[in-house]
């Protein structure tokens, strides 16, 4: 890949020089200055990064007989002597499995975008939920009469195994990487949006900010999630996770004292994440959030 890129740069550089030389206002001093400028552009760190930045690396978190596949992306120009925010992203139902690939279908390219990586350096983790499981304990069932998806929240259930593995993975990541514990963020879409609410209430006082795209949560747990700042997204025309779920959680979190933003896209269906990921200010909003962490005595 690098050989091809160097060859391409050489061609562009050569044609640029020829263009300067054939110019009617050509002089050696001007050509020398312009050649230096062109070379500086090609050799700048930003240009090199744009051509060949890092990728999500494959990992597995193993606990006894259980395995959680996950992908991890380090910041651009990663420096282990610096601290970085950690972002956990939980995928939807269609990306479940154990191939350690599908979970990147929605959002993977967003976090790898050059402008995001350069302006919002963070450690990004995409875990993958097993095919016949879910991130949360919520029960989803379609009503036979109305065909609406009904969501109920059984009380006092332990976390599902995949959620438990994510919860155990976080301190493992904090041990292995220079993570700023005041800037842990989590987000998810659809099934992962449900999981985002559950992860925050099961790990209270951990996440500075959370964003939910077409998700649903148990309003009874709002008080456990009030220290986290929230941005909730939903499509008005969503026929899977109805907008009423977003409104109910927004109201409950506000009543509990949480900072909440609610964005409803009038023309969006279930895939509101297409608009949410490019919502102006999303990353600025998230990265400015900090949670005071009690380090103990």
Image: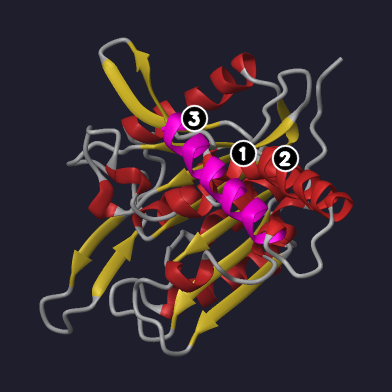
Alpha-carbon span between mark 2 and mark 1 = 6 Å
Crowd rating for badge 1 (residues with CA inside 10 Å; few <14, some 14–19, many 20+): few
In this rendering, the answer to whether 50 lies above or below 6 is below
- Residue drawn at (23%, 32%) of the image: 98
Q: Which residue is mark 1?
A: 48
Q: Are marks 2 and 1 in contact (CB under 8 Å)?
A: yes
Q: Tell me residue 153's x, y (percent).
A: 37, 55
| Residue 223 appears in the picture as rendered | no
Of the numbered discs 3 and 2, the one sitting upstream in the chain is: 2
Q: Is residue 14 magenta?
A: yes
SS label for mark 3? helix
Q: Position of residue 266 (x, y in %)?
A: 47, 89
Q: Position of residue 296 (x, y in %)?
A: 82, 19
Question: Image quadrant of residue 259?
Answer: bottom right
Q: Position of residue 286 (x, y in %)?
A: 70, 55
Q: Nearer the viewer, residue 56 or 24?
A: 24
Towards the viewer: 57 or 67: 57
Q: Which mark is residue 44?
A: 2
Could you tell me how far apart the alpha carbons at marks 3 and 1 are, in whole angstroms?
36 Å
Quadrant of image for the C terminus? top right
Number of numbered labels in the structure image: 3
Residue annotated with mark 3: 167
Task: Look at the image and tell me whether residue 195 can be seen.
Answer: yes
Question: Mark number for residue 241?
Answer: none
Magenta-colored span: 1-20
Left or right, 77 with reference to 103: right
Earlier residue among tags 3 and 1: 1
Residue at image point 62% right, 65% down: 231
């Amino acid at each position: 890949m690098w050989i091809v890129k160097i060859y391409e740069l050489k061609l562009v550089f050569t044609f640029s020089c020829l263009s300067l030389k054939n110019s009617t206002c050509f002089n050696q001093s001007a050509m020398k200055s312009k050649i230096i400028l062109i070379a500086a552009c090609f050799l700048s760190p930003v240009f090199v990064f744009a051509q060949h930045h890092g990728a999500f690396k494959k990992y597995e978190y193993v606990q006894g007989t259980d395995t959680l596949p996950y992908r991890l992306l380090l910041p651009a120009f990663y420096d282990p002597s610096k601290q970085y925010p950690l972002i956990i992203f939980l995928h939807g139902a269609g990306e479940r499995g154990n191939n350690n690939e599908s979970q990147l279908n929605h959002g993977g390219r967003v976090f790898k975008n050059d402008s995001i990586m350069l302006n919002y350096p963070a450690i990004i983790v995409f875990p993958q939920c097993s095919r016949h499981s879910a991130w949360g304990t919520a029960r989803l069932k379609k009503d036979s009469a109305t065909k609406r998806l009904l969501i109920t929240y059984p009380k006092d259930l332990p976390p599902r195994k995949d959620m438990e593995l994510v919860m155990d993975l976080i301190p493992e990541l904090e041990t292995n990487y220079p993570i700023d514990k005041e800037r842990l963020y989590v987000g998810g879409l659809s099934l992962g949006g449900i999981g985002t609410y559950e992860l925050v209430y099961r790990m209270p006082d951990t996440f500075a900010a959370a964003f939910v795209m077409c998700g649903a949560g148990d309003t009874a747990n709002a008080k456990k999630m009030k220290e986290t700042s929230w941005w909730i997204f939903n499509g008005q025309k969503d026929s899977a996770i109805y907008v009423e779920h977003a409104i109910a959680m927004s109201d409950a979190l506000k009543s509990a004292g949480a900072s909440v933003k609610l964005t409803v896209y009038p023309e969006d269906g279930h895939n509101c994440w297409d608009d949410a990921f490019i919502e102006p200010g999303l990353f600025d909003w998230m990265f400015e959030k900090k949670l005071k962490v009690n380090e103990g005595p």
